[in-house]
Amino acid sequence: MPRTQTDSPLLDAAQAAFLVGPVAINAASHDAGRMPSITRAYGCRVAADRSEVIVFLSTARSVAVLRDLAADAPIAVVFSRPLTHATLQLKGTRPRIQPLAPGDREIMRAYAAAFSMEIIALGHAHGFSHALMAPAGDEAVAVAFRPEAVFDQTPGPKAGIRLGPIA
């Protein structure tokens, strides 16, 4: 059942802080024939009331996902911390593609730097981490959505557990 504007947010403060990094962020959708599309996101912003999540996508590298979202397909976004493998998946309907807001480009740069440091600490080369995060400088758009379901996808016995709304 879709959530309404009056529902309490699904995300608690710790989850909202986790989403902004350093995490790998992948956004996915599907076309009318249910063919999946996926892309890397280059940062995230969470509304102060935690009711909305905004991810930043490279327009050049996210053509299929953006096409699917523009056709009103649902969105699923996975946030996974490389150091611990802690992972959350958010799902939502009616995502909105919009221009970056003031400050979003700075969020993307800070995200790229933090994520690069995270994977360098795991032994990946500087060149690899910087190449992986290079699209954070591309033309980008923001995709905003209201999380309607949140899942713990951390590997282990609780993987796949749907997390409920906070009180």
Image: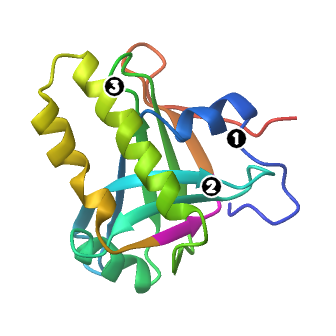
Distance of label 2 from label 1 (alpha carbons): 8 Å
Q: SS class of the residue under badge 2?
A: loop
Instruction: Check whether the beta carbons of the residues at disc 2 and disc 1 lie within 8 A of each other.
Output: yes
The answer to whether residue 94 is magenta is no
Query: Residue at position x 52%, y 73% from top?
Result: 100
The answer to whether residue 146 is magenta is yes
Q: Position of residue 164 (x, y in %)?
A: 70, 36
Query: Residue at position x 58%, y 42% from top?
Result: 150
Distance of label 3 from label 1 (alpha carbons): 24 Å
Q: Position of residue 50 (x, y in %)?
A: 74, 49
Range covered by the magenta-colored residues: 142-148
Label 3: which residue?
A: 118
Quadrant location of the C terminus in the rendered image: top right
Residue at the far bottom: name it. Answer: 71
Q: Position of residue 34 (x, y in %)?
A: 28, 71
Query: Residue at position x 44%, y 54% from top?
Result: 108
In the visual, does 23 lie left or right of 35? right
Label 2: which residue?
A: 147
Q: Nearer the viewer, mark 3 or mark 1?
A: 3
In the visual, does 80 lie left or right of 149? left
Question: Which callout, 2 or 1, points at the residue further toward the start of the chain?
Answer: 1
- The answer to whether residue 39 shows anywhere in this view is no
Tell me the kind of residue under disc 1.
Leu
Question: Which callout, 3 or 2, points at the residue further toward the start of the chain?
Answer: 3
| Residue 64 against residue 146 in the figure, above or below | below
Distance of label 3 from label 2 (alpha carbons): 26 Å
Q: Which mark is residue 11?
A: 1
Residue closest to the eye, 132 or 41: 132
Count of marks, rendered view: 3
